[in-house]
Image (cartoon, helix red, strand yellow):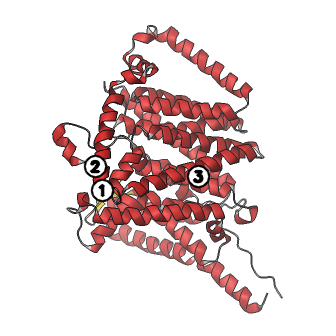
Amino acid sequence: MSPWAGTAARAAGGARWILPVGLIVALGLASGWAVVYLPPWLALAPLAGFLAATLWLQIPAISLYALVAIAPFDLSYQVGGLSDVRIQDALIGTLCVSAFTALLAGSRRKLRLKLPMAQVLLALWLFLLVWGTIAFLVGPANQWLIKDATHNSWYVYRDIGRSLIVFPLVLICLDNRRTITRLIDMMVLAGAAVALDAIWLARYVTENATGPFDHPNGLAGYLVLIMPLAAAQLLMGDRPLMRILHGGSLAVMLRALWLSGSRGGLVAFLASFVVVAIFVPRRRVVAVGAAGLIGLMLVLALRGNLLNMPMMSRFIVLTDVKDVETFQWRQEQWGIFIQRISERPWLGTGSDVDESLRDLDRAQTAHNAFLALSVKSGIPTAVVWGLLILIMLGMSLRGVLLALTTAEKSFWIGSLSFLVALGVHNLVESRLLAVVTQHCFWIIAASALLMLCPPRLLVEGATTAEAEPTAPRR
């Protein structure tokens, strides 16, 4: 390699530090100014930002973990005239900086974007981004909202970009397969925290549990995505302590799901657990089944008269779906939204909410994710989402069959059951449009692509910045 090429490589390697170090310096100066001139309670914000930025500079993957940890919690504020500004947006910003500096420095991570399967998913992702933006801006349901370019850009980001942008960022910022394992652990811990919150709050109300969400179906829609991941790690994991942690988290989430009263959520979880049971060694399934049976017997002994409990009566009607009144109601709701889709089949109305149904004393949403997507952004959007789920199902099934290690197989089984739960639940709910659901989906999709990456595109053992190859000395 020529001296000029070596100099260019070293310069590119140093370029990735410009933005992070600049951010640290700016926050440090702001913190010093705030301590001197602002009241103590106001000075805490820049100090906290300075500490967080320093920690992020040392461990860039911490932004991923934090994004997963706070994803189910609605931490939103109004900033500078913009509503619904979330802490997640700040974390997405740090991921943008990490990804941009990695690409600027010529990191090998950019080669991940050129993998054949990555290009397929990125093409579908780009279609969703562009088509969704057009549908939002021209949709009649949003014309009252359209203002100047600044506000319109924020509305598009809030409605479309916030959900989608995490996919390429996570794909670039993930270090290695160890990072994926930690992400799965963090997702399960976040699910357990949500479940504990829901169980605790349910003690003080007579209604179904909602946790940090505004409706029981929102709680169920989140838990059914995390529970399959916990079940796969419980039955296939090779870390005894973490298996205990995942098992305890699964039990807590199952309790919260029960308290939510969501029959669609229960069916989705059972469908995902069947997938797990098919690919897991039989002895482990029998062991977990026996433990579950013992737990059920203890509940029966302690509670007694279980069949007469209101929640049991609610779930037992699933033995004959035709008699479930909410299923009949959903059939009527689907018919109404199919009629709405026929009026604007290509670009939709720009929103999945039909305010005209308020006058009929009906819910304003479709209660089916694919109908909701069609109403909001047209049939092409629903078709692309269907293709994404099918492609991911094929990738996961292939990964299960070809996995060489226990860690790989546990991930692929969890991914496969995650997708089954997602698909089944969204046949009767519209949770696929929620930000937290899409974040979970895109994180699993990016993780699946990284699992397929050749070793040279992974950063094995990285804890801070990626070590780039440098030119040999002459």
In the rendered image of this protein, does residue 312 appear above or below residue 154?
above
Residue 241 makes an appearance in the image = yes
Asked if marks 2 and 1 touch (Cβ < 8 Å), the reply is yes
Tell me residue 105's x, y (percent).
62, 77
What amino acid type is highlighted by mark number 1? Arg
Q: Mark 1 — residue?
A: 344
What amino acid type is highlighted by mark number 3? Ile
Asked if marks 3 and 1 touch (Cβ < 8 Å), the reply is no
Q: How far is the residue under mark 2 from the one under mark 1?
A: 7 Å
Tell me residue 436's x, y (percent).
44, 49
Q: What element carries label 1?
A: loop
Q: How far is the residue under mark 3 from the one under mark 1?
A: 27 Å
Q: Which residue: 39% across, 23% down?
A: 322
**Looking at this view, is 394 or 261 the one in front?**
394
For label 2, the crowd category at 10 Å Cα-Cα, with few meaning under 14, some 14 to 19 and many 20 or more, is some
Count numbered badges in the picture: 3
Q: Which residue lies furthest to the left in this view?
A: 359
Which corner quadrant of the image does residue 447 belong to?
bottom right
Tell me residue 375's x, y (percent).
33, 51
**Looking at this view, is 323 or 151 the one in front?**
323
For label 1, the crowd category at 10 Å Cα-Cα, with few meaning under 14, some 14 to 19 and many 20 or more, is some
Q: Mark 3 — residue?
A: 391
Residue 191 makes an appearance in the image = no
In the rendered image of this protein, does residue 310 appear above or below residue 178?
above
Q: In which quarter of the image is the N terminus?
A: bottom right
Going from N to C along the chain, the mark reached first, 3 or 2, is 2
Going from N to C along the chain, the mark reached first, 3 or 1, is 1
Tell me residue 259's x, y (percent).
41, 26
Q: Is residue 390 left or right of residue 34?
A: right
- Mark drawn on residue 340: 2
For label 3, the crowd category at 10 Å Cα-Cα, with few meaning under 14, some 14 to 19 and many 20 or more, is some
Q: Which residue: 55% across, 68% down?
A: 98
